Image (cartoon, helix red, strand yellow):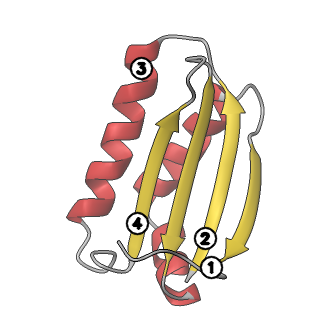
Amino acid sequence: MHGILIQYDYDGDEGAWLAAVEEFVAAIDADPALRGKFGYRVNVAADGVGRVHVGQWDSEETLAHLQSQAFFKTFAGKVGEFSGGGPNANRMRLAAETAA
């Protein structure tokens, strides 16, 4: 399993931020090529400002498909705006996990 951890601070319009996140998640869920192959979670830190996005995918082909979609490009631009120029993003790979 491959993944990415995206972190940034945001203290702007919560409604605009949440709408963008929900639209992106809905687009992922609606894409049959991503269903069961790409997962995405978005979290708000306890301080209400920190934002953490976690994406996981099964293969580089799945990631390439996601990145080729217009909804991905739109959301990536919005995250850049929300983060004030660019979030801290780190690719990762799964080493171990608990049973779900």
Instruction: Say which residue appears at 62% left-offset and 79% top-offset.
Output: 94
Q: Earlier in the sequence, mark 4 or mark 3?
A: 3
Q: Earlier in the sequence, mark 4 or mark 2?
A: 2
Q: Which residue is mark 3?
A: 16
Does dot 4 land on a helix, a strand or a loop?
strand
Label 3 crowd bin: few (<14), some (14–19), many (20+), radius 10 Å: few
The quarter of the displayed image where residue 35 is located = bottom left
Q: Which mark is residue 39?
A: 4
Q: Nearer the viewer, residue 56 or 68?
A: 56
The quarter of the displayed image where residue 19 is located = top left
In three-dimensional space, the C-alpha distance between marks 1 and 4, rounded to whole angstroms, equals 13 Å
Nearer the observer: mark 1 or 3; the answer is 1
Label 1 crowd bin: few (<14), some (14–19), many (20+), radius 10 Å: few
Residue 93 location, x and y as percent?
A: 67, 79
CB within 8 Å, label 1 to label 2:
yes
Q: Is residue 83 visible?
A: yes
Does dot 1 land on a helix, a strand or a loop?
loop
Q: Earlier in the sequence, mark 1 or mark 2?
A: 2
In three-dimensional space, the C-alpha distance between marks 2 and 3, rounded to whole angstroms, equals 26 Å
Q: Which residue is mark 2?
A: 3
Nearer the observer: mark 1 or 4; the answer is 1
Q: Earlier in the sequence, mark 1 or mark 3?
A: 3
Question: What's the residue type where badge 1 is placed?
Answer: Leu
CB within 8 Å, label 4 to label 2:
no
Q: Nearer the viewer, residue 8 or 97?
A: 97
In three-dimensional space, the C-alpha distance between marks 4 and 3, rounded to whole angstroms, equals 22 Å
Residue 70 location, x and y as percent?
A: 44, 57
In three-dimensional space, the C-alpha distance between marks 4 and 2, rounded to whole angstroms, equals 9 Å
Q: Earlier in the sequence, mark 2 or mark 3?
A: 2
Q: Is residue 68 visible?
A: no
Instruction: Say which residue appears at 76% left-offset and 60% top-offset.
Output: 90
